[in-house]
Amino acid sequence: MPVTTRNTYEFLPAGRPAPDFRLTAIKTNQPISPKACAGRPLGLVFHGQHTVQAVVDINTAVRPLYPQPSQVTLASVVDLSAVPRLLHRMVQPFLERAYDEAASHIPEGYEPADYVFLLPDWDGRTSKAFNVKHADKTAAIVVIDGAGNVVGSYQGPEPGPATLRLVQQAMGAAAG
């Protein structure tokens, strides 16, 4: 894993096509994939229960500049491969409550289904395809441009500003 600074990592090289994946959002059943988000940047936030604050930090940094869901999609990916298949139905209500909690913070007049994407990675394939490790300790971010290419990745403190820089790069790539 190339070290960017002492406490940050770039774990997925920029400039190559993003790994193909398709995950389904909790409650809305909306599919999220590079193809589904074609034409706009897609920010994937890989996190665990103890690193969910990164999602708040990222939305706080990105949404003031890009408030419309058509400008950028930001989605949470949670690796649940440690949960046995037999227990998936038991975990589902916890995920739905997490969605409801996140949706309750969406400003009035905005549709939560356009902004809150909680993507369970039940088999861990998406997390592995993106080379994400230890997202339960430090959230990991990957930004994909509208053409499906990796703009960059980041894992470290201050995920909000890092994600904003990557989204701005993706927006620049879309304009150029």
Image (cartoon, rainbow, N blue to C red):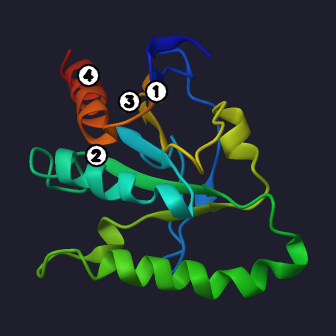
Q: Which residue is mark 4?
A: 169
In this orientation, which residue lies closer to the viewer: 145 or 63? 63
Does residue 15 appear in the picture of this structure?
A: no
Q: Which residue is mark 2?
A: 72
Does residue 21 appear in the picture of this structure?
A: yes
Name which of mark 2 and mark 1 comes first in the sequence: 2
Q: Nearer the viewer, mark 2 or mark 1?
A: 1
Q: Which mark is residue 145?
A: 3
- Which residue is drawn at the image coordinates 44% and 28% (left, top)? 154
How crowded pointer 1 is (Cα within 10 Å; few <14, some 14-19, many 20+) is rated as: many
Name which of mark 1 and mark 3 comes first in the sequence: 3
Q: CA distance from mark 4 to mark 3?
A: 9 Å
Q: Secondary structure at mark 2?
A: loop
Left or right of 55: which side holds 142? right
Left or right of 103: which side holds 136? right
Look at the picture and state if 132 lies above or below 55. above
Name which of mark 2 and mark 4 comes first in the sequence: 2
Where is residue 8 shown, x and y percent of the image?
44, 24
Name which of mark 4 and mark 3 comes first in the sequence: 3
- Which residue is drawn at the image coordinates 20% and 45% (left, top)? 62
